[in-house]
């Protein structure tokens, strides 16, 4: 294959890769903004006063309340995020 043909094929590959990356970024951004309930797993990182806990979810810490039972540090919990709104999330249950 000639050098020019090889360069054209490499350029096409680069363009296709960039287009696919941009599509994936756009899709992920759209999914993040969709309004649906999401259940995720978190870890109790700190026990606070008044049935509140610091919960680690995806590397971020959130203060959440749970009154059904006393939870232990480093235990796993399921968190419900209604309508993908993190301001309204709550601990659903302990694992």
Image (cartoon, rainbow, N blue to C red):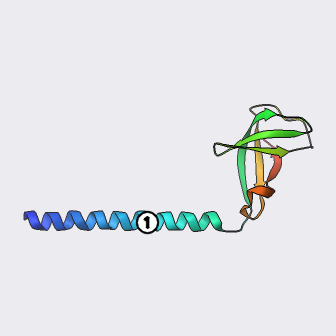
Q: Kindly indicate the quadrant of the structure image that contains residue 53.
A: top right
Q: Position of residue 5 (x, y in %)?
A: 12, 68
Q: Nearer the viewer, residue 33 or 37?
A: 33
Residue sitting at 7 percent across and 65 percent down? Answer: 2
| Image quadrant assignment for residue 88 | bottom right
Would residue 66 appear left or right of 55 to someone viewing this image?
A: right
User: The N terminus is located in which quarter?
Assistant: bottom left
Residue 82 pos. (x, y %): 78, 61
Work out which quarter of the rendered image holds the C terminus and state it. top right
Position of 92 with respect to 25 (left or right) is right
Q: Position of residue 49 (x, y in %)?
A: 89, 35
Quickly name the residue at label 1.
Answer: 22
In front of the other: 52 or 37:
52
Q: Is residue 20 above or below residue 95?
A: below
Please give the name of the residue rendered at 62% of the width and 63% of the height, measured from the top-left corner. 32
User: Residue 57, position in %: x, y?
Assistant: 69, 45
* Outermost residue to the left: 2
In the displayed structure, would residue 83 be above or below residue 55?
A: below
Q: Residue farthest to the top?
A: 73
Residue 59 position by quadrant: top right
């Amino acid at each position: 294959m000639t050098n020019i043909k090889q360069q054209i094929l490499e350029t096409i590959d680069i363009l296709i890769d960039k287009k696919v990356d941009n599509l994936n970024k756009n899709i992920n951004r759209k999914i993040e903004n969709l309004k649906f309930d999401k259940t995720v797993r978190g870890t109790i990182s700190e026990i606070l006063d008044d049935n509140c806990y610091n919960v680690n979810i995806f590397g971020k810490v959130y203060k959440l309340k749970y009154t059904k039972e006393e939870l232990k540090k480093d235990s796993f919990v399921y968190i419900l995020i209604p309508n993908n709104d993190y301001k309204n999330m709550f601990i659903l249950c302990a694992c």
